[in-house]
Image (cartoon, rainbow, N blue to C red):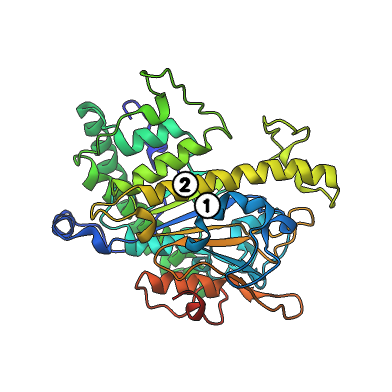
Amino acid sequence: MAGLPRRDILRGLGVAIVLPSFASLRAEAGKKSFEATQRFVCVSPNYGMNPSGFFPAETGSDYEMPPLLESLHPHRDAISLFTNLDHPGVGGGHGCSNTFLNGVEMKSTKDNPQRLLSLDQLLAEHLGQNTRFPSMLLGSGGFSWSRAGIRLPTQSDPVRVFTDLFVDDAAKAKQQTRQFLNEDTSILDVVRKDAKSLRVRLAHADQQKLDQFFTSIREVEQKLTRQSEWIDVRKPTIKDDVIRGRDDDDTIVDLQYPYNTSVMYDLMVLALQTNSTNVICFGHPGGNRLFPFDGITLGYHSLTHHGKRPELLKELSIIERFYATQFATFLSKLKETKDSTGKPLLDSTTVLFGSGMGNASSHSSRNLPVLLAGGGFQHGNHHRFERRNRDGRPLGDLFVSILQQFGIEQEQFSNNGSNLNHLLT
């Protein structure tokens, strides 16, 4: 971090409004058993998954695993599949991918940007106060939103992710960071003072905008406070073979996308295992990149606009099967990796796979591809909901069940009407 300008440290700051993480409370929490620790991971392909290959034909526990998800067959007792989950009120187009975890569009929240707060960031408020990172946002896609209504940036470089997790800064760099943080706190104090003096001269509508500005300031302050508290806390020591390869068998790690997908999953497992974070989002990018796989002749975006043409669907399935296989391997590693109590990480980790894009070929935001794994839920079934006119069951119903599974007694989130507890708990 040495030599970084202050604006680079400040870039992209934004976290949820919660009480500061106090060192004394963190020390107290460290004395307790981690048995009750719960974790949340969300994986989202920007363009969703082709509906014809994702949703099973049968419901209940005896469904046949659909073609795109065949690699998940060993995990069928630990996953739940859903058909006809929607975000009511969200329109189509590429922008719907950004609404996966909040169920609202930016254009509908001008009077109340806090409605954009995404599920992962709400969970981070409750699960992230005793970890170095309240949440980690990886890959691309940017579908996480702060309480101030800011779409949060992601990190797609595995080397940078490894460094953030496991490489301690030198003493000089720590001191420089500490100085920057102190200066930035002073700047925020001045900004807040000026804003408060302005408030008395503003009309009511403008005062609401100013309140939203104060929310943003509080989020930045929270981020600065956390950075300051963790500067001198040593990071876990982990071998770097996950990104460098192993010398004993000349293993070389490919850090280029999409081959680095497995590396990112490995880093996610390590981040959870070392209690560096309890909340992770990982986005697979869209765009029209040409995947370097045999049988692929067109860019990803072009393939998603297949118009049900068999030759394009065949190529698209190669990409989507790759994503599913990587995800299945991730679930296997969560099963194999033990937490500090000796239990599989998957037992205490709720894993959500899905997208705000239902059918990329038609830019539809209906019938979203959603899969839930782990986390102590009752799994093993495919649930299909009835559609009422254009809308299916609100995806927010599932989100409320996830919140309540974490002990967050919240009855409302997004556009939910109820919950899915009767099916999952």
In percent of width and height, residue 264 lies at 46, 39
Q: Residue at x 52, y 38 (%)?
A: 261
Q: Circle 1 is placed at which residue position?
A: 43
Residue 241 found in image quarter:
top left
Q: Which of the two residues, 363 or 95, is positioned nearer the viewer here?
A: 363
Vertical side of 135 occupied by 80: above or below? below
SS for dot 1:
strand
Marks 2 and 1, how far apart in space? Answer: 11 Å
**Neighbours of disc 1 within 10 Å: few (<14), some (14-19), many (20+):** many
CB under 8 Å between discs 2 and 1: yes
Q: Residue at x 56, y 77 (%)?
A: 416
In percent of width and height, residue 136 lies at 41, 48
Q: Which of the two residues, 339 or 291, is positioned nearer the viewer here?
A: 339
Tell me the tag on residue 330: 2
Residue 10 found in image quarter:
top left
| 286 to the left or right of 268 | right
Disc 2 residue type? Phe
Q: Nearer the viewer, mark 2 or mark 1?
A: 2
Vertical side of 155 occupied by 127: above or below? below
In percent of width and height, residue 127 lies at 33, 61
| 277 to the left or right of 22 | right
Q: Residue at x 33, y 39 (%)?
A: 165
In percent of width and height, residue 388 lies at 73, 81
Is residue 103 among what the camera can see?
Answer: yes
Quadrant that contains the C terminus: bottom left
Residue 32 found in image quarter:
bottom left
